[in-house]
Amino acid sequence: MKAESNNMKDTSQIHLIAMKKSCLAAMLLLFTSVSVAKDNTAEPDSFLISGYLESYYIHDFNNPEGSTRPSFAYSHNVVDKPSINLGFIKASLNTPNLRANLAVGSGTYMRANYALEPKDLQKLFEANVGVKLSGSNLWLDAGVLPSHIGFESAIGLDNWTVTRSILADNSPYFETGLRMAYTSDDGRWYVSGLLLNGWQRIQRPDGNTTPAIGHQITYKPNAAVTLNSSSFIGNDKSDQDRRMRYFHNLYGQFQLSEGWGLIAGFDIGAEQVERGSRRYQVWYSPILIARYAYSEQLSFAARAEYYQDKDEVIVSTDTPNGFSTVGCSLNVDYKPVQHLALRAELRKFKSKDEIFERKNGLSDEQLMATAAAIVYF
């Protein structure tokens, strides 16, 4: 995501990085000790090692000179070259009163989304520890966490489409901070409050001393319906250039029948024009995805989306209409055997301005074909 570059290396930052290294070492020690220790309170198979590897190939029919997709793509962003989007190894600990996750990863997703983090943290896909606070389902988690915003994650296997939607690519994939979360006994309600370092940050921006906050409320009245509301409020710049950002994500996921599913979502955000201003620049994005599961092995999906950011708060184009783009895609997924998924997608963008690179200039359209293979355990 967008972030200011970090070139300052003062003593406080060195201490901070050293402290983070110590925390990672402590987590590794915790994982190792738990895996070999005899703990009568731990549940069976509470310590797990998992892995994930997603390779892909994208052909851009514009035949651009460059090898990367437009600036608003932060996942599957290399064209006409076989690439790894995301590969990681993850260790997970789950006991009745303690949980922890540590994952290190690599790939084009990691390079695009972690580029402005300190170098020794750019492989850190996930690192968090959680403790149960009471007899009820109330947990406090701390560390690098998956984002609480949206229905799409960095892990392609969790999503209905091969590439990420524009709204997913341009809102946080991960976050760092504290999360207090409660799940009702019947599993229908999930409520969390978050204290964060910023908009997709491990380390806060230079000169920023103000944490951000967020919330998530998920309601599942039955197995066929999921309704979700998530928010972010904070400043992702220095205190001197403070501009408050207010963002809300709303979506519903519905299983209409045994085969048909539907996701409808809407993102909207507003950021101050300048510090202390009462004027705000607004962006928004509606999306609709339909999915048909023919069998456990074969499924199809179609997506329609629109992203409007005329003031270029999130996506910079330097064009008269800012970023105003319609997108659609067709997807097919096939799982021939366990732990293997083969995916294909045809996707088209249409913008008000010529923002897409082509061989001999720019175009207001882009058509891409994507193939992906996922191995997981």
Image (cartoon, rainbow, N blue to C red):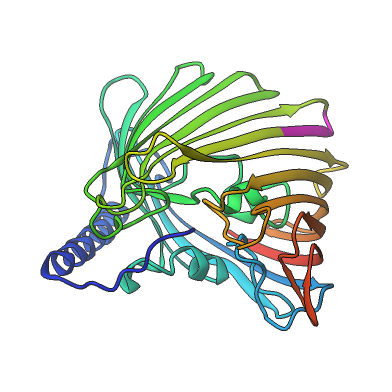
Query: Which residue is at a point 68% across and 81% down the rendered structure image?
Result: 66
Residue 79 is left or right of residue 347, and the answer is: left
Q: Residue furthest right?
A: 294
Q: How many marks?
A: 0
Query: Which residue is at a point 71% across and 56% down the rendered structure image?
Result: 338
In the depicted structure, whether residue 80 falls above or below residue 128? below
* Residue 108: quadrant of the picture: bottom right
Q: Position of residue 237 (x, y in %)?
A: 34, 53
Assign the C terminus to one quadrant of the image. Answer: bottom right
Q: Nearer the viewer, residue 187 or 39?
A: 187
Q: Nearer the viewer, residue 176 or 354?
A: 354
Residue 100 is left or right of residue 111, and the answer is: left
Q: Nearer the viewer, residue 164 or 271?
A: 271
In the depicted structure, whether residue 18 falls above or below residue 235? below
Q: Position of residue 97 (x, y in %)?
A: 29, 33
Q: Is residue 26 magenta?
A: no
Magenta part, dominant SS: strand
* Residue 204: quadrant of the picture: bottom left
Q: Position of residue 123 (x, y in %)?
A: 41, 68
User: Magenta segment, which residues?
Assistant: 258-263
Query: Which residue is at a point 81% across and 61% down the rendered structure image?
Result: 344
Q: Position of residue 261 (x, y in %)?
A: 78, 33
